[in-house]
Image (cartoon, rainbow, N blue to C red):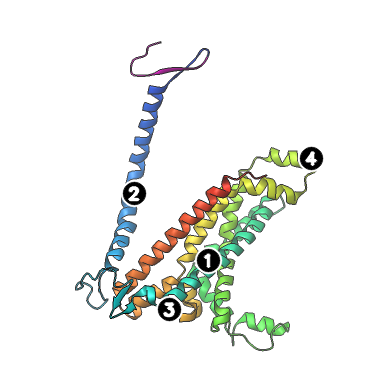
Amino acid sequence: MIMSGAVAEASAPGQVIVKGRRSSLTRSRIRAAWLFVAPSLVVVALIAGWPLARTIWFSFTDASLNSLSEYEFIGLENYLANYDGEWFGILTEPDWWHSVWNTLWFTLVSVSLETVLGMVVALILNAAFPGRGLMRAVILIPWAIPTIVSAKMWNWMLHDQFGVINDLLLRIGLIAAPVPWTANADTALWAAVMVDVWKHTSFMALLILAALQMLPQDIYEAAKVDGVSPIRVFFRVTLPLIKSALLVAVIFRSLDAMRVFDLIYVLTSNAKETASMSVYARQQLVDFQEVGLGSAAATLIFLIIALVVVITLAAGRVRLGEDPR
């Protein structure tokens, strides 16, 4: 069979697939998709791409906040430089590496707790019970509160003299004296984790609940008929089916947690012992007015976050490719 402008392929008796027309239709759809996406890409490039490029450029200069228009290109000296056998730059600063450790620790602990608690909340909200709709709305209230507001609210509640948390713990006898939760380096990061978990667990629960709502119910009916225990069903059926959505939720929260600034800044009053990477960058940029060093710190934050996302995606693909059995 000969068809103009197309290649005919017989895949089964009596069935002909026109490959040329199909590929032409696919190309047309791709072009239409790019036309629809192009305005958004332009807006993103202007809003995010230009400031990012300018920040990266300033990281190679000696610009300061006092004279932002007068600067010189100094290469990698803000990152790492050697003068007379002595190393300088942000990569040699103990405070920077301490902020990196604080950020990674905060991200790992908070996102892990939020994922586990979010899964529990999502499983509860996925079950049928009276008032489920109201409960789903109420659970989002902590997430809807702006971070700066919730941080200030918890800062008052955790105050060692006037806070309700210390008052409650004193009344029930769990502590003998008021604890400065946000002023003590040993407890300040844990306090920040607690506030972050309180705020963002509902976000994780919402994403996981959306994945649970898409699962086919006939699988669970078959498992119930076969007498499979709910715990076994969760680990052998539910968890493998929602792995992709769970991975996306973890990446979203990890991105947000690694950029944490306002929560730690409000709770710990810009203390070096609890500073995150963003707090360190702000300190270089505003307190010390070193635009070059602050931009270098911001660029490193971008690279670290990108690296973590790539590693998470790679690890997720490996796990998703495994046999769930």
SS assignment at label 3: helix
- Amino acid found under the numbered disc labelled 2: Leu
Closer to the camera: disc 4 or disc 2? 4
**Residue 94: image tag:** 3
- Amino acid found under the numbered disc labelled 3: Pro
Provide the residue designation for mark 2.
Answer: 41
Provide the residue designation for mark 1.
Answer: 107
13 left or right of 294? right
Provide the residue designation for mark 4.
Answer: 226
229 left or right of 176? right
Query: Upstream in the sequence, badge 2 or badge 1?
Result: 2
From this view, report whether residue 35 is shown above or below residue 300.
Answer: above
Residue extent of the magenta highlight: 1-12
Q: Residue at x 22, y 69 (%)?
A: 73
Camera-side residue: 144 or 309?
Answer: 309
89 left or right of 257? left
| Cα distance in 3D space between marks 4 and 3 | 59 Å
Other-residue count near label 1 (Cα within 10 Å), few / some / many at <14 / 14–19 / ≥20: many
**Quarter the C terminus occupies:** top right
